[in-house]
Image (cartoon, rainbow, N blue to C red):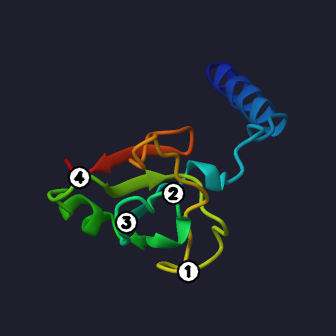
């Protein structure tokens, strides 16, 4: 009986420690951490127009080569107008462009690939 007392006390301490813990705070789903992939479908000079960016799948994004004229090509972003919309109906929130209308990375647009 004496040799089991240590095991019983260890079990009681373990159960007591687990019983008084709570889940880690701040573990809710954050849609800002999701990535969305877009391809530019308009003419050069219109890259800042969010409606000219079409949502594409990750595999399409990865296989898209950005050859051609100097303009926007594809963007990875965490900012869409309505994240609850189904694929491919989401719209990109904003596209930051430079003076030549070439898209630039921003806080939300984490990866930008432009045509050379």
Of 42 and 100, nearer the camera is 100
Identify the element where label 3 is drawn. Answer: strand
Q: How far apart are marks 3 and 4 (CA)?
A: 10 Å
Q: Which residue does the numbered mark 3 point to in the structure image?
A: 40
Residue 80 percent location from the top left of the image: 60, 62
Decide which of 75, 62 is in the foreground and name it: 75
- For disc 1, the marked residue is 86
Marks 4,1: beta carbons within 8 A: no
In the rendering, which numbered label is found on residue 72? none
Nearest the camera: 47 or 58? Answer: 47
* Label of residue 115 in the image: 4
For residue 11, which quarter of the picture? top right
Mark found first going from the N terminus, 3 or 4: 3
- Asked whether the beta carbons under mark 2 and mark 1 sit within 8 Å of each other, the answer is no
Residue 20: image x %, image y %?
Answer: 85, 34
Quadrant of the rendered image containing residue 41:
bottom left
Q: Distance between the residues labelled 4 and 1?
A: 28 Å
């Amino acid at each position: 009986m004496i040799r089991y007392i240590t095991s019983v006390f260890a079990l009681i301490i373990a159960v007591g420690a687990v019983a008084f813990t709570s889940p880690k705070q701040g573990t809710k789903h954050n849609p800002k951490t999701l990535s969305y992939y877009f391809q530019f479908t308009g003419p050069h000079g219109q890259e800042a127009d969010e409606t000219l960016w079409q949502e594409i799948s990750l595999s399409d994004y990865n296989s898209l080569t950005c050859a051609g004229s100097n303009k926007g090509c594809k963007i990875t972003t965490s900012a869409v107008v309505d994240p609850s919309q189904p694929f491919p109906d989401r719209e990109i929130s904003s596209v930051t462009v430079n003076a030549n209308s070439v898209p630039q990375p921003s806080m939300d647009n984490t990866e930008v690939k432009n045509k050379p």
